[in-house]
Image: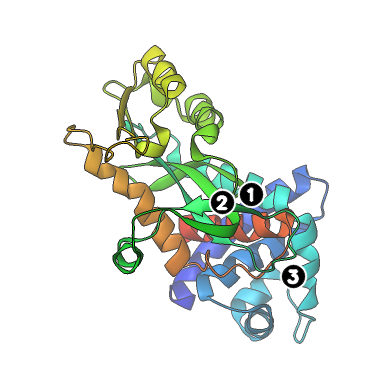
Amino acid sequence: METCELKNKIPEVLAYARMVTKRNGHTRKYAKHIVALVVKQIMHFTDVQLTEFLSSNEIGRFLGYKRHFNHTIFSKVRKTAAKIVKELYEFFVYRKMKGRTIRLTAMDSTDIQAFSSNDKDAKYGHRTPSKREQRTLKDNAKTLFFGYKLHAIVDAETEIPIAVEIAPANRHDKTFFHRLYRIAKETFHVHLTPNAKFLADAGYDSTDIYQELHYDNVKPVIAINGRGFYKSSVPKDPEYGKRWAVERVFSRLKEVFGLSKNRFVGMKKVMTHIYSCLIAYLVKYL
């Protein structure tokens, strides 16, 4: 994103940030740090580079930063900002999706490696290798990694992540369906849309998921899990291919906004990083 384009979007982000920070008992000045963390992800900066940018650029002057301030302020903010950036993301999504109809939702998760093996909040979990990785592996077994997972339900037509959850990697994907689906229902009324469909891979092939979707008249378009006895089968529904919308969202978050470049230890700091990436995604693409 060009600096001039970013400059035009900063006032809106700052206004939202001030509302959320005030609600959480912080001063208006605190909001500029939240916006700065979003700028960091958009511009691919380190904390030091972010400080230099805000010290010399008109965006920094607009936010209220002085020249040559100490970059350690961002490390301090990350310790207390997790709840605020989460609420800011939710508020941003609500404003962006207001008045829109959501017919197709897609759900999946993506892995986020822990920065340190001493991260007490991170856990070992499984991830599905990319197609490129699968070609180099002896079999298609899932690979083990240490860290966290971002679980998300995405509007498959606009590619907006409407409900997300961050958790240690050892939690199974399907356990987050009910929580995230409930958010999608209560906030965006996805279950009231005619011909609504829920798209997911074989990890969500579960009786309780089918039951809840059928109760809401939402058609489950979910791959059948072979349970290790046979190969999972892809649904014949012509719209199943739109499930890849959630994969594209994860790909952009990792490749464009630095989601995979986690340099933080502990759930709170990792959450701040992930939600900053999500907000950056919304700011750039919407």
Q: Earlier in the sequence, mark 1 or mark 3?
A: 3
Residue lying farthest top? 215
Going 63% across and 84% down the picture, which residue do you hit? 49
Going 63% across and 79% down the picture, which residue do you hit? 46
- Circles 2, 1 touching at the beta carbon (< 8 Å): yes
Q: Give the residue number, with chain letter if any, for mark 3.
A: 74
Q: Give the residue number, with chain letter if any, for mark 2.
A: 125
Q: Amino acid at mark 2?
A: Gly
Q: CA distance from mark 1 to mark 3?
A: 24 Å
Going 60% across and 46% down the picture, which residue do you hit? 170
Going 54% across and 33% down the picture, which residue do you hit? 175
Q: Give the residue number, with chain letter if any, for mark 1.
A: 168
Under circle 2, the secondary element is strand
Image: 198 above or below 112? above
Q: Amino acid at mark 3?
A: Phe
- Circles 3, 2 touching at the beta carbon (< 8 Å): no
